[in-house]
Amino acid sequence: MKEIIKITFALTISCMIAASAMGLTYTVTAKAKKHNHHMNVYNAMVGLLGFGEENPAPSDLKFLHVYRYIVEDGDKKFLGYMVPVEKGSEEAYEMVLMDLEGNFVEKLEVPISAEKVEEDLDRAKALQEVLAPPKTFSYADSSVVATSGGKRLGYVMPGKFPGFRTFIHALVAMDPKFELLGLEVMEHEEDAGLGKNIEEEYFKNQFKGKTYEKLQTLKVVKKPLPVEYKKYLEESKWEEGMFTEEDIAEIRKQYKDADIYAITASTISSKAVTDGVKILAKKFAYRIGKLDSVLKKEEIHAAF
Amino acid sequence: MAIQEKTNRQLFVDGILSENPIFKLALSMCPAVGISTSVMNGILLGTAVLFVQVCSSCTIALVRNYIHPKIRIPTYTLTIATWVTVIDLVLAAYVPVAYKAMGLFVRLIVAFAIITMRLEMFASREPVGKSFWDGMGMGLGFMFAMMVLGAVRELLGQGKLLGFDILGFGPLLYFVLPCAGFVVVGLMMGFFNWIEVVYNRRKEA
């Protein structure tokens, strides 16, 4: 008995020391870690919209977040979109509730500032005030509308879909006509030399420029990637004079409606990404359409 | 045991060659098979293991007289887990570039046999200085083995080394697949044993 108490005591003390060490490190590093993650996503989004060193982003480029919630009131279910609205010079947020068919139900002002809106906890707190019980809400997802000079440049959707190993986290960007601007793989655990190639340019750039119509029927084909197309896709490896303007236009025309060439020996990963992008894009296009029509009908002046 | 008489330098060299964690002790085979698909993976995982091994070895050597013998294994696991978490958080916060490449590997280490085994066999009995050099040797030995495996598999599987195209084509995709890990580890183990036998025979002659 005495022995067991001694062991319990020793183990408890060790656990507490370990926990305090971890907790301390977390407190010290949390802010920097969040900042890094934020910058990572921001840079990826800027890159997806086609801006880079040679083509700097406009100074008034803004990423406006739209948060989607599922709101329940008794046995009734609503979709809630939290959108930034124009209100004088300040940015305010409104919760637009609609039923499952997309008919407008109600709009509510959400008391939250622009700095706090990206924090999940702060957002939930602010929403608690306007959506008091018996109404309950749960966060579904968010997407980003990129604007510059009051015009929409495109949409960026963060998404998560099952890959060969675990979930693949990716960003998909579309222009206002729902043509794909690109794909960026943020996090994944696919195998090196196989599924890991989804982050290679020759795979992810294949999605660039696919129209919304093509996206409906986009397939993965198990054919070798044509050499010329591969060279064209690997943009960062371009050398001067490798492609003339006409060459580029020619290749683009030729492969505009091509399906996705699977990565050798990684058909499952290739298919997972392709399906993920398709579903993400389809759902988003449908949702933003519904949201836009409601915003227009109800004369809600969203900031995008 | 002979360990007591070894100098720091011997400890260090032994970890890399005659007591190499993968080729000699046959520990931590899961990462050796699963992750050694390229040289870069080997370097990254090796660095991560090196850090965690050295930090954990020193910690355990410091508190070795206070550890209750019946709960020493949980204490080791706890120590490793703490160091892994701390390194993971610090990398994520201050060295985001390294974190992007290494983050996944760092988190894998908690379950590595080699670290627990070194804590049990060595750090819990020896002073901090010696444990440090043992940790360094084991960490570098692991890195060396992973790099050798990675080089063979990357060259034969993808025709590349460190991401640079060497052959221009991948001769045998088989070497990238997990099952080839076993084959390459086995062949390498045999190769290193053979070298040792030859070396010892020459020494005797």
Image (cartoon, coloured by chain):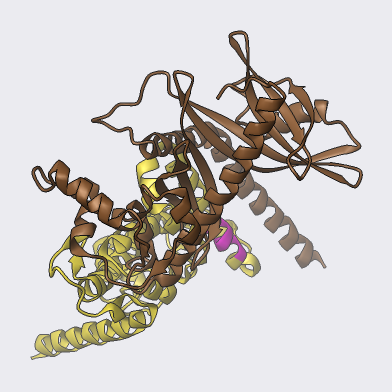
> Which x, y percent locates residue B146?
30, 69
Residues shaded magenta: B74-81
- Who is closer to the viewer here, A181 or A122? A181
> Which x, y percent locates residue A164?
48, 68
Q: Residue at x 59, y 57 (%)?
A: B66
- Who is closer to the viewer here, A120 or A295? A295
> Which x, y percent locates residue B24?
32, 80
Q: Is residue A133 visible?
A: yes
Q: Residue at x 59, y 61 (%)?
A: B75
Position of A250 with respect to A265 (left or right) is left
Which quarter of the rendering shows the C terminus of chain A?
top right
Which quarter of the rendering shows the N terminus of chain A?
bottom right
User: Which quarter of the figure has residue A196?
Assistant: bottom left
In the rendered image of the structure, the colour used to display chain B is yellow
In the rendered image of the structure, the colour used to display chain A is brown
Q: Residue at x 23, y 58 (%)?
A: A229
Is residue B56 found inside the magenta-colored segment of the image? no
User: Which quarter of the figure has residue A266?
Assistant: bottom left
Majority SS type along the magenta span: helix
User: Which quarter of the figure has residue B153?
Assistant: bottom left
Which residue sits furthest top? A88
Against B108, residue A137 (above or below) is: above
Position of A125 with respect to B109 (left or right) is right
Is residue B79 found inside the magenta-colored segment of the image? yes
Q: Is residue A168 visible?
A: no
Q: Residue at x 70, y 26 (%)?
A: A297
